[in-house]
């Protein structure tokens, strides 16, 4: 398989916190559209085109599918068949913490769950190690020390190069990052949900990450597709909200949100951008943000989204207009 030789000059790479790693400012997640209910050839094309566009970071989790685990299995197959010679050019992440198998060890943050889950993921991915291993969500019942000691152990075993946390708030993140620092395995990155409709990480978590030199990669930066022009005139058949396996529920597409989407779309058009590109540029405006973690159903969506890099600058007036639109009742 031959890839675009200028791919690294066409993408922007940003240092992940104060680590040695740089990530593409647009990364691809395999939560939807890569499972065994999906078209495998389309999945393969999306991975190839992403890599061709300079996307070096692919994000997975134990449970992505459906069926759970099938996104890792499919990615492992694509990697083995066509991308393995490029393994050292890739940052591949996985996660554990959400429900994956029956019984008391199939989810959350115990040593038992994390180690067993990563072993399963490595088999599905056909890899000896992942580049980043995340604890997917905080566990209110397991001592934080147990979870962090396990992440440190996993790195020392060579099964992950770096560790990250997802969905932890700023207080939990600070405690966890301090424990990891003491153990000698600094936290590389945080993965929170962040988009124009959901700004919960402002300002505390973002400030903490910047202060501590931890990177940040935002998931659902397009609000699962709502921050594109696709829902402006209803719910199209080829959309996540219409898909029986889609996480976005049709009742989330309210009149109020469509009204905001239309106004935001107008700002994007005035900038000669699509709304998806504006939403990604907006997400990346923050210094603490290393990368936006997009999802996609097609090569065309990935191409469009990567072109956000053509215009990342937002004026103070544009930012103000966006804030006003978002805060309208
Ligand atoms: N850590 C966590 O707890 C967590 C949770 C969720 C996700 N994630 C990660 O974040 C990644 C991205 O999440 P997400 O898929 O929700 O991200 P997103 O980028 O907000 O939404 C992606 C969806 O938006 C639509 N879309 C994308 N580009 C478009 C375009 N240019 N025009 C029109 N529609 C477009 C597509 O859906 P349709 O075309 O099907 O409508 C696509 O599947 C996941 O794959 C996963 O890796 C992590």
Image (tube, rainbow, N blue to C red):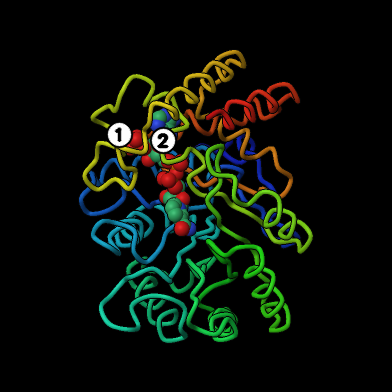
Tell me, yes or no, whether the two marked residues, 1 and 2, touch with CB atoms within 8 Å. yes
- Report the residue marked by disc 2: 225
Identify the residue at image location x=47%, y=20%.
Answer: 262
- Dividing the image into four equal quarters, which quarter contains ligand 1? top left
Evaluate whether residue 300 shows in this view: no
Q: Position of residue 95 (x, y in %)?
A: 45, 67
Q: Quadrant of the N terminus?
A: top left
Left or right for 149, reference 185? left
| CA distance for labels 1 and 2 | 8 Å
> In the rendered image of this protein, does residue 237 appear above or below residue 135?
above
Identify the residue at image location x=32%, y=68%.
Answer: 124
Q: Nearer the viewer, residue 237 or 327?
A: 327
> In the rendered image of this protein, does residue 202 appear above or below residue 60?
above
Q: Nearer the viewer, residue 136 or 82?
A: 136
Judged from the image, the secondary structure of the residue bearing numbered disc 1 is loop
Binning the other alpha carbons within 10 Å of mark 2 as few (below 14), some (14 to 19) or many (20 upward) gives some
Label 2, ligand 1: CB separation under 8 Å: yes
Judged from the image, the secondary structure of the residue bearing numbered disc 2 is helix
Which residue is the extreme one toward the front? 329
Q: Nearer the viewer, residue 151 or 325?
A: 325
Quadrant for residue 117, please give it.
Answer: bottom left
Q: Position of residue 92 (x, y in %)?
A: 49, 60
- The numbered disc on residue 73 is none
Q: Position of residue 106 (x, y in %)?
A: 33, 78
Quadrant for residue 207, please give it.
Answer: bottom right
Quadrant for residue 295, please give it.
Answer: top left
Label 1, ligand 1: CB separation under 8 Å: yes
- The numbered disc on residue 239 is 1
């Amino acid at each position: 398989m031959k890839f675009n030789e200028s791919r690294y000059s066409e993408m922007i790479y940003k240092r992940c916190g104060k680590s040695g790693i740089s990530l593409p400012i647009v990364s691809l997640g395999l939560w939807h559209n890569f499972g065994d209910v999906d078209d495998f050839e389309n999945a393969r094309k999306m991975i190839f085109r992403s890599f061709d566009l300079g996307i070096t970071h692919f994000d997975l989790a134990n449970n992505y599918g459906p069926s759970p685990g099938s996104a890792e299995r499919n990615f492992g197959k694509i990697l083995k068949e066509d991308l393995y010679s490029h393994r050292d050019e890739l940052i591949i992440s996985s996660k554990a913490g959400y429900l994956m198998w029956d019984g008391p060890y199939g989810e959350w943050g115990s040593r038992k769950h994390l180690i067993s889950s990563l072993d399963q993921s490595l088999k599905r991915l056909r890899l000896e190690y992942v580049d980043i291993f995340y604890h997917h969500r905080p566990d209110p019942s397991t001592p934080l020390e147990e979870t962090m000691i396990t992440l440190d152990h996993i790195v020392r075993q060579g099964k992950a190069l770096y560790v990250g946390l997802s969905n932890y708030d700023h207080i939990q993140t600070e405690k966890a990052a301090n424990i990891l620092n003491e153990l000698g395995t600094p936290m590389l990155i945080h993965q929170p949900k962040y988009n124009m409709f959901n700004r919960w990480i402002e300002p505390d978590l973002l400030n903490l990450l910047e202060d501590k030199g931890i990177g940040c990669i935002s998931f659902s930066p397009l609000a699962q597709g709502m921050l594109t022009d696709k829902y402006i005139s209803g719910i199209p058949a080829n959309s996540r909200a219409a898909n029986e396996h889609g996480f976005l529920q049709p009742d989330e597409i309210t009149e109020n949100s469509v009204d905001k989407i239309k106004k935001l779309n107008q700002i994007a058009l005035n900038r000669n951008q699509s709304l998806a590109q504006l939403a990604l540029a907006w997400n990346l405006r923050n210094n603490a943000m290393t990368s936006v973690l997009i999802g996609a159903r097609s090569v065309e969506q990935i191409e469009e989204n990567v072109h956000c890099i053509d215009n990342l600058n937002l004026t103070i007036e544009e930012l103000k207009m966006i804030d006003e639109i978002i805060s309208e009742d």
